[in-house]
Amino acid sequence: MDVPAYTYVVVCMVALSAAAAFGALALALGQLAPRRPARRSPPLRPARPMAFDLSPAGPQPAAPAPEVLRAPELAPAPAPVVELAPRRPPRRRLDLALMSAQAPERLRVPVDLARGRILELNLPLLLANAGDDELEGISVQLTLPNEITYGASLERLAREGAPGLPGVIIRYALSEHETRIRVDIPRLAPGAAVTLPTPISIKHAPDTAYQILATAHVPGMEPLQRRYELELMDRAISTAPLSSADAWVCRPDEDSRQRDPHLPLDRIASMQFVIFEPDADGPPPPAGQPEPAYAPQTL
């Protein structure tokens, strides 16, 4: 059986009325229920620009504040320390040599002897202050065998002293076998060099060597000692050999020979010698020329 159309209309209207009534009832019940306090929403944050964060999810530590770059602080330069160098004490040095600073310990002296007469000559003893300080109270002692000394020569040396050295005192003493000569020098300036006479009296010229000992004393210093061998040769009998590294031939200045009218004595007044040094080129210089220059050195 067919249902008329107005029946559908009536049914729909009833359904809508029932829905409206139900809605009105629900609204009325909502008005009667107690109201809850309004919940405030959190304030809106300003929008951030879009960025792609690739760090892992979860809370991250706060990033450290950027470090401010500062210029490095320079430490103040320390004040310069002025160190005073310790003052070197004055150097004290004395040089002593017979005939020459470079001379070996053996010296050969050819001489011309006259029959019945004694020949006197002076060997140069070189003394030099090679230090920085003045030396005072210098005492030089020579020890010679009695065979090459003569009393008259020693007396004259003690009386006249050393030429060019004021204030020098010379004394001598004789023993059974040797003669000791002492020379006292008050002072010697730095760099000063003096020549002291060493008296040799030759009565004969045998082929033998005589010992000569020279010693220098200065207060506050170690004694300085030098030993030499003096070999005398008669030129009328033997020919003087040439010098070698261990022996020098030293010829005296025969032109300065003087004859004593009261004593049987011939004196060679000059202390200059012609030294035939080894390995010397050319002929030896004539007699009377000065000896090689004295170069101070530590002996």
Image (cartoon, rainbow, N blue to C red):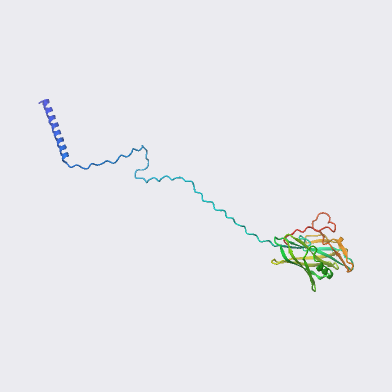
- Residue 197 rendering spot, x and y as whole percentages: 80, 64
Up/down of 62 relative to 151, above or below:
above
Residue 148 visible somewhere in the drawing: no
Up/down of 169 relative to 58, above or below:
below
Examine the image and state in which quarter residue 174 appears: bottom right
Residue 108 visible somewhere in the drawing: yes
Examine the image and state in which quarter residue 39 appears: top left
Q: Give the residue at the far left of this rendering.
A: 1
- Number of numbered callouts drawn: 0
Residue 164 horizontal side relative to residue 115, left or right: left
- Residue 54 rendering spot, x and y as whole percentages: 37, 40
Image point 13% across, 27% down: which residue? 9
- Front residue of 90/227: it is 90
- Residue 76 rendering spot, x and y as whole percentages: 52, 51
- Front residue of 267/261: it is 261
Examine the image and state in which quarter residue 36 appears: top left
Up/down of 282 relative to 269, above or below:
above
| Quarter of the figure that contains the N terminus | top left
Q: Give the residue at the far bottom of this rendering.
A: 176
Image point 17% across, 39% down: which residue? 31
Up/down of 292 relative to 218, above or below:
above
| Quarter of the figure that contains the C terminus | bottom right
- Front residue of 112/77: it is 77
- Residue 110 rendering spot, x and y as whole percentages: 84, 63
